[in-house]
Structures are given as C-alpha cells and as structure tokens.
Image (cartoon, coloured by chain):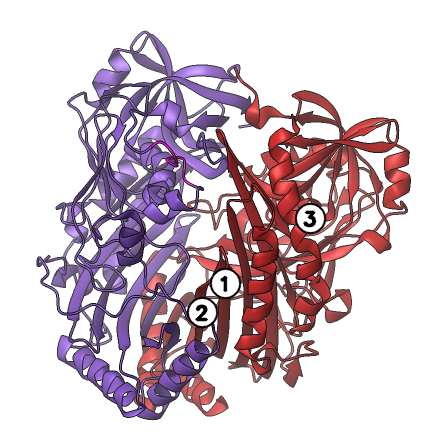
Amino acid sequence: MYDWTNLAIETARVRGASYSDVRVMHQRQRVLTTKNGRVGTLGQSESLGLGIRVVANGAWGFASTDNLTREGVTACAAQAVAIAKASALAKKESVQLAPEGSYIDSWQGPCLKDPFEIPVETQLSLLLAVDTEMSKVKGVTLTETDMQFRKIDSWFASSAGSRIHQRKFVSGCGIVAMSFQGDAIQKRSYPNSFGGQYILGGYELIEAMELLKHAPRVAEESVALHSAAQCPEKTGTLILGGSQLGLQIHESVGHPIELDRVLGQEANFAGTSFLTLDKLHHLRYASPIVNIVADARVQHGPGLGSFAYDDEGVPAQCIDVIKDGEFHGYLSSRETAHLVGLSRSGGTMRCESWNRLPMIRMTNVSILPGQWKLENLIADTNDAILMDTNRSWSIDDRRYQFQFSTEIAWEIKGGKKARMLKNPSYSGITTEFWNSCDAICNADEWVLWGTPNCGKGQPMQVMGTGHGASPARFRNVKIGMAFAKQ
Amino acid sequence: MSPQTTKLTPALRREADLRKIAASVLRLARSQGIRESEVQIDETIDALTRFANNAIHQHVAEQSLTVSIRTAVDGRTARVTTNRIDEDSLRAAIENAASLAAQQPKDPHLLPLLGKQKYRPVRRFHPGTAALSPESRARAVKHACQLAEKHGQVAAGIFSSGQNQCFLANSRGLATAYRQTHATFSVTMQQGSAASWAKGNAGDYRQFDPTKLATTACERAARAQNPVELEPGRYTVILEPAAVLDLVGFLFYDFAATSVADKRSCFSGRVGKSLLGENITITDDVYHPDQLGMPFDGEGVPRQHVTLVDRGAVKNLVYSRQSAIQAKARPTGHGFALPNEYGEAPMNLVIAGGDTPLEKMIASTDRGLLVTRFWYIREVDPYEKVMTGMTRDGLFLVEKGKITKAARNFRFNQSVLEMLRNVESLGPARRAAGEESFEMVVPPMKVGSFQFSEVTKF
C-alpha cells in the first residue's frame, strides 16, 4: 500500500503541495440482526480506498478515490492540490502545523478472537436463541438483537516521512425488548441502548456479555414498566448508572472540549462550545472529586477511542480534561495546538474512512473511579432516583443545557432500592450539574463504554468513542421535566 | 455564478458501463449455480467547501463506486457490498453472499425476485451542477465571508455539490437506472454571542442564491442581539419551514407498515383515525418537482404517490413487497434493500401548504415566538410522539403583530401529533433543508400552545 501513498505524496509535491498526508484504508464489516425470531439484516461489506490531504498556497485541500491505479491515485493527488489552491481564494492565514516526529511503525489493537473467523451460523444461532428467550415473556411485542464487527487496516504516510500501519477490530452487540400496551411503548436494552456495547476487540466481547442470561430480565422489565409508577417531577438527588454517565460525559464534557468547536469551525453544524479559551485553567467545571481524562492509549482499556497513532500520525496520549474539578485541557490537533499554548497536538484527529478528512474527535473520555462501592452509595442515600440505560439525549449547540431520559429508574428510599419508575428524565446546565457530583463509585463498577455512533462534520462522519464510567451521585438535579405537563 | 469546469472535474461513468458491471455479476452468479441474484451499483462524486471564521478551513472531494450483491437461494438471502470491481473480487463477493445466506435458517416468507417493471422517468441531472468547480464554490463562499466582515459578523457554513447514480438489476430481467445532481449552501452568521442561519438545497444549484441566503442570515443575526429571557411555558409559535421539516420529519418511519405491525409506530392502532388537524394533508411523492430521489425502491418496485394523511385522518401507510402481503395491501415502492428488519419508509414527504405567508402569520400574532430552526431533536415518548430539542440560531418574540426582540433559546418537550392538531395557519409549501431530517416539501406553520419546558443561557 505504501506504493500508492508514495505516489500520491510525490504527485502532490510536484503539483505544489508544501505538506501532504495520505491514508489508505481497508475496512471490512459484518452485520447480523434478528427481529421477532427471524433474521433481519445479514450482510458483509468491504471498502478500500485512498484519501490525501495537502497544504498548497497555505491552504487545505483533500481528495479521495477508490480507483487504486496509477492513473486514479495521480488524479486524486492532483485534485487535492487544485482544491487547496481554490481554498486559498478565501483564506485568512496560512496553515500552521505543530511540530511532530516521523514514525515508522506497525501496530495491531487488542483482539483475542477474530470475529470474522467465527462462523456466521454460530453468531446467528446465539442471536436467534436470545431473541426467542425474550419473545417468551408475555406482553413483549417486539424483540431485536444485533452483532456488528469491523476489521480496519490503515496505512498512514506523510511527506514528513511517517509510515504507520494499524490494524483494529471493533466488535459490538445488543438486545432489545419492547412492549406496547394501551397508549405506551416501553423498552429495555442490554448491555446498553442504541446498539449495545462496543469495544476495540474481538468476539470475546460477545462471550463476555452473556446475552442469553440477560434476555429474560430485559424482556420482563420492558413489560413491568407499564405498571410502574411515573417518575415524579421534582428537584432532588440523582444516581446515574455507568452507561448513562458515559453518555453524560460524551455530551457535556467530550464535545465541549473539542478545540475545533471552541474555535468556531463547527458553528454551522455541530455547534460551538461554552468552553471559550479564557476558561482554560480558570473554570471550576465540576466538584473536586471529579477527574476526567481523554486517554487514547491502549492501557486505558479496549475503547473505541484507543489507538497507537491518530490519523495525523501523532502518537496516542492521555490528556487531563478535568483535574480535581478544574478545567484542564482541550482535545487538539496539529493545526490548533498552538492556539492553547501547546507545543504539540494532543493526538485526537481521526477520520471515519479513507474518503473523509481527519478531524478532532473524542478518544476515550472517561471519569476516573471514585471510592464508593455501589451498595454503600445506595445505603448512604436517603431519598433519590437511580436512572439507568439511555432512552433519549439532547443538548444545546453550545453544550450548556441538556435533557436526558432513560429506559428505567428506581426510587432509593432510606438507603434501599425501592419501587421501579417509568419514563424517567433529568435536565440541567452542564457546569451546575457536574459541580453537584458528590460520590463516584470505585473501579469495581467502572466500565469502558463504547459509543459507536457519534456524528460530526460536513460531510457527516460517524465515529466510535470510549467513555469509562462508574455510577455516580448528583444533588439538587431537576427531574421529570420531559413528561411534565404545563 | 457560472460553473467553471477544470480538467480535474470528474464525471460519472456512462450507464452502459454500469450495465456491463451488473451483467458480469449476474453472469458470474449464474456460473456458480445461483439462480436468483440482484445487483445494485452506486456511484458518487461529491465535493464540499467548508468555511468558518470568514475563511475556508476544509475543502474536500470524493469519488466512489460500490457494487452490492444479493443472492437468494432456497429461502435464504444475504448481501455483500464491495468497492473492488475486478472480476475476481466480484466472484469472491458472490461466493461470500451465497455462503452467508446458506448459514441461516430458511425463511418461508422470502419472496422471489421481482421481474421487469415500467418506471415513470424523472430528470434530475443538471450538467451545470455536476460541473461546479472548487473555484466556483470558493468564490461564492468568499462573497458570504465578505458580507459578514462588512457587518462585523463571522460566517461559517458549507457549499457542496455532487452527482450520483444507481443501477439496479436482477436475474429475472429487472433493470433500472437513476442519476441526479445536488447542491447545498448553508450559512451561519455570528455577531457577538448571537447567531442566525439559512440554508438552500436543490438538484440544480441555480435554484438557490448563496448571496441571498447569506444576506438573510446576516440580517437575522443582527436582529438576534441582546436576547431576553422568557419564562418557559406554552406559546403560539411561527415555525419557519426548516423548523417544521426537522420536527415533522421524525414521523417518517411511523408511516411504515412494518413499523405499525411491529407496534413501534405512533400510528399503531390508529390508522384510519382523525389524529391531526383538518388542515393537515401529508403525501409521499417522489415525482414532486421539488423532490430528489430514485423513482424505485430497494427491490426495484416503482414508487407510488401515496396519501398518508388526508385532512387530518391517517389514511394509508407505505409498503414493501413483504409487508404488503402481510397487510393484504399493494406494495407502494418504498421498501429498503433486502435483507433488512425495517421494511420500508416514505422518503419524499410533502405537507400540503396554505395561503398565509409568514409575514401575515407574524402580523396576526398578539404574542408568540418566531422559530428559525430546531436542534438536537430526540424522541421522548414514541407513542404520543413527544420530541425534545432546542431552538437555535434565531428565536424572536412577536408582540402585537411585530417582531420586537430576540429571546434566549428554549428547550421544548412537545408531541408532534398534538402540534399538528394545533396548526392555526399554513404558508406555501416549498423544499426545505434542515439538519435533523432529510429534505422535504413543507410549509411554514403557525401553531398554538407549543410547549417550552426550560431555557438555556443564550
């Protein structure tokens, strides 16, 4: 593949590029789903192509092609340079890149069992068995299961001399039971909603999730929710389950710290951020017990934001985002690093595929574990609502005001988990919410959740991000607004 | 603006080239003993010029072709997609699809492939749009940035253009092709902490004017200064077409027969009932002059014009071949490519408009809010279709028939069904573009008693 990257870089240089980097990517994907005991989707896909990003006349250009011939690659590189020169018609300043070393490396992410080596028949049999198990529960009206696997090989090369090959496996699975009764649809999912749990890894995830064991509970809870009490509307104490806290981090910490948003580069689509540059090291983002990192290193765990190098060829790093409650750092790139006084990029530039431009993306943005055992945290709580498994999420375009609802909740009364509640929701303002955190569960409860569907950019790119979280408690939170009648 | 082509402006392959690839796939499948096979070839050439802080910061182009192959043998079907089109790769893809299919239980409901069909022709390929060069887009962007600078504002947005084509064929002789062009100009103007937005999208770039869109956003951003904080509660709202589109667009899958059969649609148990106001009529019409999209579905069934809601009553759903059999109805040409679990959906919604222009809606409002667009809309209650989201890029207070000031953005929790019962007046329908839903033909609406639940900081 480096023959193609070399040809592209050389063509770009001859055409007038002062810098170029190239990604050849080969992606393979398998998708299996079932619905109501029958196979839904059954398919595989592969995609191979090349994308080249160049600086010419001080401006950016990018072009991509799946025509991996001498003619196709040369034309693509020439097109990227022509585009860069057109960009220079409306530029303010020339592109400035933070210095970075050049690397020759080959790396493979964690994978114990290659999911593409497991027969489809085995995978489908498991999903159909789980589906049947959920269907047995009276009152369940829809059952769905899914597995998805990806194998991604990428070859990065830059005009500065880097040549980096990375191989990653991504695996995910999830199950859903829905129940329609009267005028309501209730739903339960496992291990998480909207596709389930995803990791950078192989079929070991599917085996670890024990889908069959959880199927009856998931189905029973979807039906039981109909007779549960409505979540009240009040201001009170909230305990969030780990997966919901992971999404809370994603929306109210992960996105606001993206430096491209902060600098207005996403103003037309994904939005901007309340975290203006003056707030760096000056904002009490959260209570002092809150520590959040953006850690792309594999030692953080097999997250969807784990890698050896980002798609600008910058090695994976761990960045302190919130340290003892103080706002400490942004997600940056080679182009933006100098704007916040950094001598080098934080290594967060990633692209969805060969036909997309790398952009600043969350890596694994995780809250570090606290001291509490979950049972002790509940025992320590007199009156609260425990919410689990996201059902809907929404936040304004500067990431201040949010509202989340979850599939299920339970009252906590006198230190004990009491009755189930339906239609739970909570809302708030980002920094007020994080400053109300007074307890975080320990490493025993900490899970590195995978969010496979983070959309950003124009053209839209979908990226996987990781969020390590354990259950945590928040005080004086507005609860129940989504269903409040006015 | 006139298009400028360069030697580097790529072109789509000829239809005959796609037909040749399809014939190879069907021949290779036959040679492997696979009697039933289907092939869909998609080719895309897209480009996008992105700007922020009054300068271009991203500028991209892509070209790709994918071949998607479905085999159906003995009640078992599976799909394999590849962008490698040499004969060995296509042969491997067919083998792979057959192997996947063979590893599943037999599906007694799997239908044989569809035979030859007749299609109503649509012309949606505009050579001028296909030929738009990076320089042409960059110049339009530069004008928008200059306009922003002149008014002390900061511009961000995109100017994209592209062309794509699809060829669908199967072993029973079905063959159909479609090609279109498309262009989008979207602009956000920021002045201090205020912002506003405008967007145009069409098959032919000449159907919108980037300078006019930039001017609209510029004027609104100036008006959006110093927003007042209002109390949450129920308000009369005047929704611009983009706001209507992004909210009502969330209904589209509820009209799928499969969604109703699965009991996850808000119309489950309600088909035939008068759920919405008598002034609401919704159709699905791929042939509408303001629509884009293929006139056939994933199996090659010609798309029909379907009246979904007639004067408030939910009249019809859309059907794939499979869901039509289950419901004893006729397929409407809205099925997704098989195999899938979702069935079908209407992709070309048209909400009938009225004759009240936006200005008249404002003039007739004693106290209300004018909404430019919504943002981050998500479903809270699937059966009552309660959606949450934020207002964005221009929320204005209307008092005694006039826009008096800007307001801080609100969060809403609003049933779309209830909203469509509370529509007081409608303006002329037009193709609208938002960010949460695909483009549709919708009117502006004046709606009573719209529920805002909380307010944000700006």
Q: Secondary structure at mark 1?
A: strand
Residue at 28%, 68% (x, y): give it.
B44
- Residue B35, percent from left and from top: 27, 82
Give the mark, 1 or 3, whose residue is nearer the N terminus.
1
- What residue range appears in magenta? B265-270
Q: Secondary structure at mark 3?
A: helix
| Residue placed under numbered mark 1 in the picture | A33
Q: Main secondary structure of the magenta part?
A: loop
Specify whether B366 is left or right of A160.
Answer: left
Q: Secondary structure at mark 2?
A: strand
Which disc is residue A416 wearing?
Answer: none
| Residue placed under numbered mark 2 in the picture | A42
Say what amino acid the circle numbered 2 marks: Leu
Q: Is residue B186 above or below residue B248?
A: below
Q: CA distance from mark 1 to mark 3?
A: 20 Å
Residue at 32%, 59% (x, y): give it.
B336
> Quick one: label 1, few (<14), some, or many (20+) residues within 10 Å?
many
Chain that the image shows in purple: B
Chain of residue at mark 2: A
| CB-based contact (under 8 Å), mark 3 and mark 2 | no
* Residue B143 highlighted magenta (yes or no): no
Q: CA distance from mark 3 to mark 2?
A: 27 Å
Give the mark, 3 or 2, whose residue is nearer the N terminus.
2
Q: Is residue B49 visible?
A: yes
Q: Is residue B149 visible?
A: no
Residue at 85%, 55% (x, y): give it.
A443
> Quick one: label 3, few (<14), some, or many (20+) residues within 10 Å?
some
Say what amino acid the circle numbered 1 marks: Thr
Residue A107 vs residue A147, the one in the foreground: A147
